[in-house]
Amino acid sequence: MKPCEITRRINIGIVGYARIPEGSAAGVLAEEAGRLLVERGFRVVTGGLGGVMEAACRGARAAAAYKEGDTVGILPGHDPRAANQFVDVAIPTGLDHVRNSIVAHCDAMIAIGGGAGTLSEICFGWLYKRLVIALGTEGCVGLVAGRALDHRTRYTDFPEDRIFAAATAEEAAALVVAMLPRYQKHWRGFEPQ
């Protein structure tokens, strides 16, 4: 196989609360979303720490289709050892919250709960014209689910573009599969507005 024939794996970011109680609804959604995405052949990218990020990576690792490298953590600090135990590839950035911009460059993003940090990732995803899915109704996702984040028209041929709402992890994974091709077709000539 020639290097130019290599097919790139699709990266799906899962973002949300950095701290969650054991057995929380957000944790259950994140774990299930991570598992379902890997089962469908995607790679899971998170901020690499605890909470929703850890639950998503744990779920990805539990998938029958899991392969080493399926979980990537884009860490805010300098130490790769800060990554949760389910991260295969730990990328320390030293960028603190600015690393949210890197996570938002994934092919698509699923947000679960969250506060200001998660909201910044959603905003970056919107600015970068990515598919963004709000899973559940907790935290900041409840504020943005089902609506356009601002006045801009991101795609003139896609009037239903918005932050898509999903009630279940299965629905979120199905939205990724169904909607991602509509977003990907535009990226070749991407220029931020």
Image (spheres, rainbow, N blue to C red):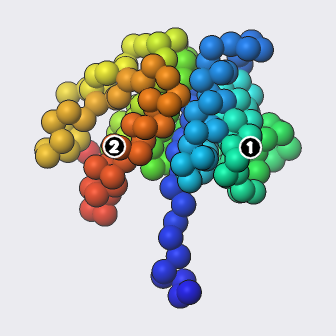
- x 27%, y 62%: residue: 189
Say if residue 92 shows up in the picture. no
Say which mark, if any, is on residue 179.
2
Q: Quadrant of the C terminus?
A: top left
Q: CA distance from mark 2 to mark 1?
A: 25 Å
Residue 26 place in picture, x, y as percent: 61, 18
Q: Nearer the viewer, residue 65 or 109?
A: 65
Q: Secondary structure at mark 1?
A: helix
- Type of the residue with mark 1: Arg
Say if residue 175 shows up in the picture. yes
Residue 117 place in picture, x, y as percent: 56, 25
- x 50%, y 70%: residue: 7
Q: Are marks 2 and 1 in contact (CB under 8 Å)?
A: no
Residue farthest to the front, as pictured = 64
Q: From the viewer's perspective, is 163 left or right of 68?
A: left
Q: From the viewer's perspective, is 17 left or right of 133?
A: right
Q: Secondary structure at mark 2?
A: helix
- x 58%, y 33%: residue: 33
Q: Nearer the viewer, residue 80 or 38?
A: 38
Mark 1 sits on what residue? 61
- x 61%, y 47%: residue: 38
Count all numbered tags in the image, as a single digit. Answer: 2
The vertical placement of 76 against 55, above or below, is: below
Q: Quadrant of the N terminus?
A: bottom right
Residue 190 place in picture, x, y as percent: 30, 56
The part of the image, by quadrant, that contains residue 100 is top right
Label 1 Cα neighbours within 10 Å, binned few <14 / some 14-19 / many ≥20? many
Residue 31 place in picture, x, y as percent: 66, 30
- Type of the residue with mark 2: Met
Q: From the viewer's perspective, is 101 left or right of 165?
A: right
Q: Nearer the viewer, residue 115 or 42?
A: 42
